[in-house]
Amino acid sequence: MPGTGTNNGANEEPTKPRRSTRKSETWKWLVPFIICTASLILWIVFLYVSISPLHPCSESTGVPVVDLVWSPFGMEIEVSSPSRLEPLEDYKVSALKDGTPWSGFPRVLSDGNIGIGPASEHLNFTDLMSDGKLSGGDFFTLEGLESGSQYEIILIWAADDNVLAREIINVP
C-alpha cells in the first residue's frame, strides 16, 4: 500500500551506502602534520649536532676541551666546539703582543670589551647566544693591530690557570 510504509522495501530501490567523508578529511591534515613534525625533529637534531658536538673533557684535570680557530672573516678568533658549556666567569683570557703580556691580563672572560693593548689595540669578546656561557660560535675580535706584530690570545680555565687553547696571529 502506498504511503503506509508496510512495503518493507520490496518495490524500493536499494540505497547505496553513504561514504564517510570524515576519514578522508582526517587524512588530508594528518599526513602533512606527521611529515612536518618529522622534518622539524630532524632539523633540530641536525642543528644540535652541528652547533655543539660533544668532545670528552680532559681526563687529567676534568676541565672542558676548547678549540680556538682563526676566522677568515677578519681579525676574529672563534670558539669551536667546547666539550661542555660553562659560565664565562669560569674562564680567563690572556693577550700578548710580540711575546709581552698586555697590562692587567689575564682577565676574567666577559661579553664586550675585555681590554686595551700597549699600542691601543682592543680585545673584545662576543657571547653569540647571549647566555653567559662559552659556546661554539662565540668569538674574540682584535682591533687596531700593528702590522709586523705577532699577537697571541690564550684561553685559561680560571679554577687552576690551566691553558685550554691558544691562537697566534701574525699581522702582515
Image (cartoon, rainbow, N blue to C red):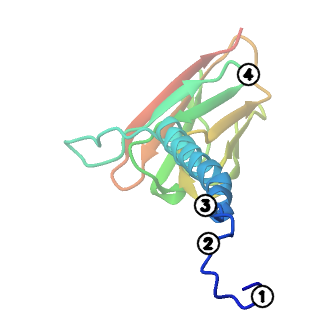
Q: Which residue is mark 3?
A: 23
Q: Residues within 10 Å of mark 3 (few under 14, many from 20)?
A: few
The disc at residue 10 is: 2
- Identified by mark 3, the residue type is Lys
Q: Is residue 43 left or right of residue 165?
A: right
Give me the C-alpha separation between circle 2 and circle 4. 88 Å
Q: Nearer the viewer, residue 105 or 54?
A: 54
How many other residues sit within 10 Å of disc 1, few (<14), some (14-19) or many (≥20)? few
Q: What's the CA distance linking mark 1 and mark 2? A: 14 Å
Of the two numbered discs 3 and 1 on the same chain, state the one appearing first in sequence: 1
Query: Mark 2 or 4, which is nearer the eye?
Result: 2
Q: Give the number of the mark in front: 4 or 1.
A: 1
Of the numbered discs 1 and 2, the one sitting upstream in the chain is: 1
Pick whichever of labels 4 and 3 is earlier in the sequence: 3
Q: In this orientation, does residue 73 appear? A: yes
Amino acid carrying mark 1 in the image: Gly
Check the picture and name the quadrant holding the C terminus: top right
Rendered image: mark on residue 3 = 1
The residue closer to the viewer here, 110 or 31, is 31
Residue bearing mark 4: 73
